[in-house]
Image: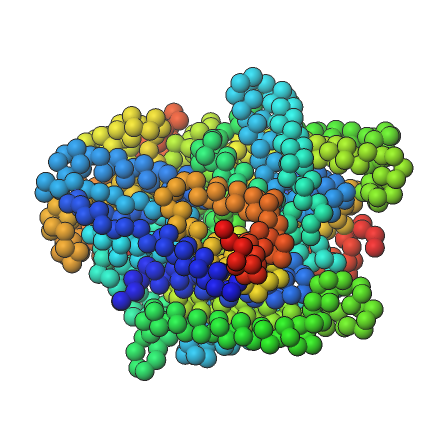
Amino acid sequence: MISGYLITILITIIVYAILAHSLNVITGHAGQISLGHAAFFGIGAYTSALLYTGGGFPFWASVPLAAVVAGVVGAVLGIPCLRVRDDFLAITTMGIGFVVEAVFLYLPFFGGAMGIGGINLPKWFGREMSKPEYFLLILIVFVLLILFDRRLGRSWIGLAWSSIREDEQAAEAMGVDVVRFKVMAFVLGSTIAGLAGGFYAHFLTFIMPQNFGFGQSILILCMVVFGGIGTRWGPILGAVILGILPEISRPIMEYRTFVYGLLLLAMMRFQPGGLLGEESTLPRMLRRIQFRPSENR
Amino acid sequence: MWFDDCSLLTGFNMLWQQLANGIAIGSVYALISLGLTMVYGILRILHVAHAGIYALGAYVGWFSFRLVGDFWVSLLFGMAGAAVAGYLVERFLYSPLLHLPRIAPLIASIGLFIALEEAFRIVAGPHTLTYNARIGLGDLSIGSFKLTETQILILLVTVVILIVLWTFLTRTRIGLAMRACAMDAETTSSFGVNVGRIIAINFILGSAMAGAAGVLIGVYDNQVWPTMGSIPAYKALAIVVLGGLGNIPGTVVASIVVGLSETFFIGVLAIPFPRDAVAFIAMILVLMFRPYGLLGKA
Amino acid sequence: MRRLGLMGMVCGLFLFFIPGTGQAQDAIKIGFFAPITGPAAADGMSAKHAVELGLKEVNDGGGIRGKKVELIIYDDRLNPQEAVAIANKLIERDKVVGVVSGSYSGPTRVTAPIFQKAGMPMVAGYAVHPDVTWDPTQKKPNDFIFRNGYLGEVEGAAAAEFAVKNLKAKRISVISMDNDFGRAISAGFAERAEKLGSAILTKQMYKFPGEKDFRPFLTRIKEGNPEVIFAAGYYNEAASIVRQAKELGITAQILGEEGFDSPKFLEIAGPAAEGVIIATNLDRDDPRPVVQNFLANYRKAYNEDADMVGASSYDAFMILVDAIKKAGTDPKAIQKALLETKDYNGLTGKISRFVQGEVVKPVQIQVVKGGKFRRLAVIDNPEVITPPTK
């Protein structure tokens, strides 16, 4: 029997891993900085919560629909946003984050400051899923997402994204429809974030607007950059580390947020590519072990 | 829903009062945002930790006020403390990161901002400190319209700082070099201008203004608290974008526009929408029609 | 290969947070969580200080049934998902017998169903969300969860009772922070005031946390020229409202709530605080030793005056300790003792009983006089102070 404490942390981490992966599609694959990613996470969570508690939809319908709604909103907001220059985009997405949070807070339809409660774990075989089972479910979804990402990376879309990331103007000159592929990345990233939101709402059972604020957006971005932006495993590693950091640093209680800030700073100062970035120490060490096992003295 | 019971436009009787309220808060926004836009103009980085410098200015001002007991001295100390901090940040944090993709300094800046907020809490305690300074200006009342002492102070300090800044940028050689750098650092460098020094001066000036804003807000609200920078951190970014990233007059206009529109949203239209969202809605709307900000050029 | 190394790292990290739980101790463990860092750190600190004071008193007095009490303290950073982890940790790792919440509604609200499911009694100090004690899916009370603070509606209604009956206010403006507490208390206030025949001129909500500039709101209020302004906020917002109202020349009586109840409010608002009336649960002029000793000991221990948050958290802790004294360390027995609470002599008022986990006790009306909170009136109309049952 795995303890509920451990499973709670594992679920938190896996949700963050999906989120970090979703942002990596936008920021890592297509090179657009988003400072408002929690908005799509929130849209997913609220859609799922409202469909489940208000609409009577089962979990199995509400969570996929949450992903769809987040994707559609991502498309609607993304198309005008992507017209602006890169730094403007970062701040525009931040603005979207604030406006979305304000909408949750001010429209009574979304439960306002009281939030939405009573969102339970899904049912299967006539009973409520246990937390370990729920964890396995999210894990399976996560693995499928990663496999899908691998396929995508080898496809035309993946190639188009990497060309945009490397040099937008050159890509444009080569005939890549830059805006179309950017929007595609934005929509895909938003959809996956919405999916994570659905899982999160059913795990937390109660959501309120503050869960999806600026701080959350920053945290997701930090996970991506911390692990290694644009790499497949980096953001996931970032999610794991920053996800459990609050728990393992409990003994230093009053200083842990301070340490978290310093950690980000030090990371950028000394390993700006992130833990698994091409030029970073860890992959270099791993490569050395891999290629020259005999030289270990 | 919390729509007001009153008719929507009754607030117009207090129009002048609301105008004063809006311009006062807009002036503080201007002081904070100017430093940010100057840093962006020259380095092209989003300096989130600027709001941490702003809070630092308030803390230094508060501390020196406790020591010296004179408001004007504490204002100078607050500005000086922020300027030194700004210089150190540029020297030891940003300058090694400039050759990297722009996300690296952004994340470092966020990390620094979080660490600064926590450092204030650890050093000065989680509670709000009071900055109860006697300024010696007095209120100004005309009928039911009233300009409080702190509002007069804010307007006065802002106007003086803006005039000094403008003179500096347009009438001195360094100011000219700064503007040239903001346009094209490489070319300016080829003319023999020491770009590193220009960047440092930029940070010092911008941070000093943020420090002044911190002190002014400390006195205006009589409060200095650890997380006082968290709203300016993002609101200043919205204002800077609205003004056209790197554009100094645009930033001043945008600050006043945001200050006024927030005030009128709350006080006259009474639409129950959070004031922070107002800045962002304004920003997004403007960007849709003018992708480079209010006064920005392509 | 590279991935293998990564997996190894991940596993290594996991080993980190499987600490030894082997320190078997004979102490009675009580869990406690509060926002000790983050935006609500000041309140979290007050709560922690007060509960630690209570802990010291209990242990100095010989503990409970000869056993020492051990307090397991966690910081939730005002973050609900951290609170979920904390709740599970308290139940499974720390094996506490009961829990005290010194936190806001968000974290308390998410932990309530977890404690309820685990059959673990929790007493919340001052969290106000109605769903702390209520399960919205099952439509029944969370019978393991108890609340020492008033429901927002009750406190708001009591303030309205005072405004209309004692202050004879006919024209009232309401300004409130936009969170669950602000919404609940201002709704309770407006409903009762209108029922008693007064007019609510304006209802305004401001953003929480972060709003500092209330001049636009107050300028609007001034125009309506009300007799009473009911303002809801915590001490920072409260002090700003009071000061800025004064600056703008507003002469209406300001009526606040328990969020004002902090020495920090008096300090920040300064002379503008004079004459402000609040509805709260702590009566500093109460001669009962439990009140006077707490105030004196708190001052001595931390060199600052106690506030409502601290007092309420202290009370929550002591209510739980009292139940353990009566019933022993079995959580189910503790819950039963809590359900049977009758005329408990609390720091924040005599608790006659709990109704569906909600406290029943009179609401204190205090006024700021000479830079101090002083007793003005007590609202004990049962129609007002009995929490509504669902």
Residue C118 lies, with reference to residue C368, above or below; the image says below
From the top left corner, tell me how far across and down residue B62 is, in percent.
55, 26
- As rendered, which of A165 and A106 lies closer to the eye? A165
- As rendered, which of C281 and A154 lies closer to the eye? A154
Rendered-image quadrant of the N terminus of chain A: bottom left
Residue C221 in which image quadrant: top right
Residue C286 in which image quadrant: top left
Residue at the (82%, 43%) spot, across then down? B185
Tell me if residue B94 can be seen: yes
- Left or right of C113 in this view: B40: right
From the top left corner, tell me how far across and down residue C69 is, in percent.
19, 42
- As rendered, which of A138 and A152 lies closer to the eye? A152
Q: Which residue is outermost to the top?
A: B68
Residue at the (74%, 40%) spot, across then down? B38
Residue at the (58%, 72%) spot, across then down? A149
From the top left corner, tell me how far across and down residue A44 is, in percent.
51, 69
Tell me if residue A104 can be seen: no
From the top left corner, tell me how far across and down residue C52 is, in percent.
27, 37
Residue A198 lies, with reference to residue C230, above or below; the image says below
Residue B159 in which image quadrant: top right
- Left or right of A229 in this view: B290: right
Residue C15 lies, with reference to residue A173, above or below; the image says above
Residue at the (56%, 47%) spot, across then down? A267
